[in-house]
Image (tube, rainbow, N blue to C red):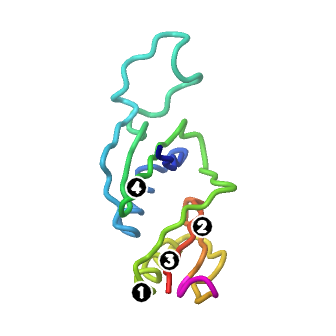
Amino acid sequence: MQIQPYLFFDGRCDEALNFYKTALGAKVEMLMRFKEAPPQTPGEGCKGPMPDGEKVMHASFKVGDATIMASDGMAQGKPEFKGISLSITAKDDAEAKRFFDALSDGGKVQQPLMKTFFASSFGMVADKFGVGWMVVAMP
């Protein structure tokens, strides 16, 4: 069994994918736009108007060995990510700093990156989309 995070960027998915490519070296493996979906039969599918055809219906990207899925969802406003954080383990303190600094760009630091009793580097940040990240490097 495998559990994968699925992030809804509410209209900012393309921007998020480009950000994660730069910040974390993410590789987009699959991307489907709403315009690629077959026409809906009345009474089937999502309720309400479909998002602009250029918006991302579904994407899958890799960060290291992890697969993360993403979408624009119904693209109706500001994305919100509450009660969840993604954890990324860096190979060393230098990589942890690089990830943390990149994710902090335009975001909000919640716990500065620092040495703790359980890690040589640990920090928490909400990136510019509001996605919570815990960055850790083990001693």
Label 1 crowd (10 A; few <14 / some 14-19 / many >=20): few
Q: Is 40 above or below relative to 92?
A: above
Asked if 89 appears above or below 38 in the picture, the reply is below
Residue drawn at point x = 47 percent, y = 72 percent: 89
Mark 1 element type: helix
Residue 33 circle label: none
Residue 68 shown left or right of residue 21 in the figure? right
From the top left corner, tell me how far across and down residue 88 is, in percent: 49, 68
Verify CB contact (< 8 Å) between mark 2 and mark 1.
Answer: no
- The first of marks 3 and 4 along the sequence is 4
x, y percent for residue 13? 45, 49
| Label 2 or label 3, whichever comes before in sequence order | 3
Q: Secondary structure beneath disc 2?
A: strand
Residues shaded magenta: 117-121
Q: Position of residue 36 (x, y in %)?
A: 33, 29
- Residue labelled with disc 2: 126
Q: Identify the residue position indicated by label 4 in the image.
A: 17
Q: CA distance from mark 2 to mark 4?
A: 16 Å
Residue type at mark 4: give it. Leu
Could you give the CA–CA distance between mark 2 and mark 3, rounded to whole angstroms? 10 Å
Question: Looking at the image, which residue sits at the far top?
Answer: 42
Label located before the other in sequence (2 or 1): 1
Dot 1 corresponds to which residue?
94
Give the CA distance from mark 4 to mark 1: 23 Å
Q: Secondary structure at mark 3?
A: helix
Type of amino acid under label 3: Phe
